[in-house]
Image (spheres, rainbow, N blue to C red):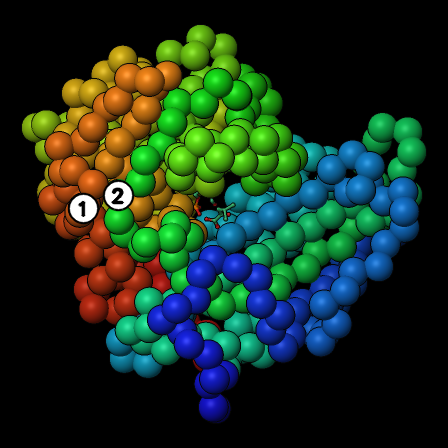
Amino acid sequence: MEKKNIDWGNLGFSYQKTDQRYVSNYRDGAWDEGVLTEDDQVTINECAGVLQYAQTIFEGMKAYTTEDGRIVIFRPDLNASRMADSARRLEMPVFPEERFVEAVEEVVRANAAWVPPFGSGATLYLRPYMFGANAVIGVKPADEYQFRVFATPVGPYFKGGVKPLTIRVSDFDRAAPHGTGHIKAGLNYAMSLHAIVSAHAEGYDENMYLDAATRTKVEETGGANFLFVAKDGTVVTPKSNSILPSITRRSLMYVAKEYLGLPCEEREVTLAEVSDFAECGLCGTAAVISPVGKIVDHGKEICMPAGMEQMGPVTQKLYDTLTGIQMGRIEAPEGWLHEVK
Ligand code: PLP
Ligand code: COI
């Protein structure tokens, strides 16, 4: 199979139409068998649940080429189960988890020419999503849904690749206690748009959101969880019921403990203690691990010791080990690499 003629090394994180996407419809209480289609347009009623009341959820995952030439997807079973959790929270029907993995595989297979070659630094980003498709005018869940998966080749999420980022402590909240911060609902991102646009306008790469109840504890950013490294080498990640349970973060904590033998803690992290940490990174599918060099809290700068040119040594080790596992250079734990044949 011939690869597309793309300048893989210079891709940003943006959408590009690929050849095939997957669509399945839920009607009369059941999902249909699903098809691949070339049609990238969605036609729905003007009063669809997604358009009126934002009844939509999504996932983000990546397929890529390993060093030995296999095409793999990283831990898709975890995305399938998180999407099921998201669906239940928004009163949507669950797209069966095994079918989710099959659908994603089908999309990768059908777009194999778009899977970036090994070593290019690019990946094929996969976006499963589901939305309420029929008309609802009273506030209630839709009866009909569409589940879709598209693929698009991407480069790094943050411009500059792995250069340390500058973030600010946000005055806006992302998620309420007992709200929807722990699921991947489109509404969480809609309400972050004003915060991210104003952060960018002020020269920051991202927002650090605090817990909405007390505004003293670190939650996450708009699209990634935090990892901190304490001065004694302990890897610390915030524990909260209102952040997304990042698959990358869970994988990194496992890598820190089992591969690197580092002490690990998942616990509440206060904003007040952030200046005591030696390293800070953002982790997520799109972000992989992006180092944070500076956190600005209303004019007060917290500068990470590794500076603004490179990531700290523990972050670097975590990055090298995780990407080594993903690319097949380091043996992966059972079930982490899902090969698409
Ligand atoms: N937090 C938020 C708000 C996100 O949107 C994402 C991206 O998916 C993450 C964290 C990272 O999660 P994952 O590692 O599963 O991609
Ligand atoms: C991801 O990392 O897959 C995300 O969904 C983060 C962002 C692009 C919303």
Q: Quadrant of residue 183?
A: top right
Percent position of residue 1, x then y: 48, 91
Q: CA distance from mark 2 to mark 1?
A: 6 Å
Residue hosting label 2: 164
Residue hosting label 1: 309
Q: Residue at x 42, y 76 (%)?
A: 7
Specify the farthest residue to the top.
214
Instruction: Give above or below for 14 relative to 191.
Output: below
Label 2 or label 1, whichever comes before in sequence order: 2
Query: What amino acid does circle 2 point to?
Result: Pro
Q: Residue at x 41, y 62 (%)?
A: 155
Looking at the image, residue 52 sits to the left or right of residue 247; the answer is right
Q: How many neighbours does mark 1 have within 10 angstroms: few (below 14), some (14-19), or many (20 or more)?
A: few
Looking at the image, residue 205 sits to the left or right of residue 269; the answer is right
Query: What amino acid does circle 1 point to?
Result: Glu
Instruction: Inspect this view and state whether residue 153 appears.
Output: yes
Are the residues tagged 2 and 1 within 8 Å (C-beta)?
yes
Percent position of residue 267, x then y: 30, 22
Q: Quadrant of residue 225?
A: top left
Q: Residue at x 54, y 17 (%)?
A: 177
Percent position of residue 212, x then y: 50, 15
